[in-house]
Amino acid sequence: MSKKYLVQKSPFLVPTNDGKYIAEHFGLATDGNPNISIAHMKAPPGWSEPFQTPEFDEYTLIVRGKKQFIVDGKKIVLSAGESIKILKNTRVQYSNPFEETCEYLAICTPAFSIEKVNREKD
């Protein structure tokens, strides 16, 4: 009989050089699933990424703090308890220009991969 569940106690900690904490609980780096990735993230104050046009849908649920999104040129700020779905092939920039760390969950379908995020050069 195969196991019908998987408890994740050791998420993959993605190495970063910008102070952002990324713990992938499920996805390509942990269980090899190409269909979905689920990550716990913490973006420090002042953090930002280059614009990108991912080949996956991304759902973000803010747990604590605030996060700024620029989606097709429109600035959106979400606070704790709010969420957003950004469809694949949409140009977006993620940032935390605020004074406190933003903690959030990110879910990507299909799974996040660096090859499919399509980040622009600075």
Image (tube, grey):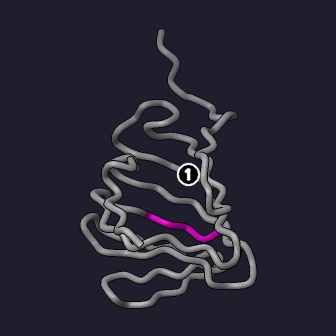
- Density class for disc 1 (Cα within 10 Å; few <14, some 14-19, many ≥20) is many
In the image as oriented, which residue stretches furthest toward the right?
Answer: 100
Residue denoted by label 1: 39
In the image as oriented, which residue stretches furthest toward the left?
Answer: 89
Quadrant holding the C terminus:
bottom left
Instruction: Using residue 116 as the reference point, say whether residue 122 is left or right of it.
Output: right
Instruction: Using residue 109 as the reference point, say whether residue 68 is left or right of it.
Output: right
Q: Is residue 58 above or below residue 11?
A: below
- In magenta, the rendered stretch is 59-63
Type of secondary structure dominating the magenta stretch = strand
Q: Position of residue 2 (x, y in %)?
A: 47, 14
Along the viewing direction, whichever of 120 and 116 lies nearer the viewer: 120
Q: Position of residue 78 (x, y in %)?
A: 56, 82
The quarter holding residue 17 reads bottom right
Q: Is residue 69 above or below residue 103?
A: below
The quarter holding residue 41 reads bottom right
Identified at 37% across, 68% down, the residue is 121
Identified at 34% across, 68% down, the residue is 120
In the image as oriented, which residue stretches furthest toward the top?
Answer: 1
Q: Is residue 23 above or below residue 59?
A: above
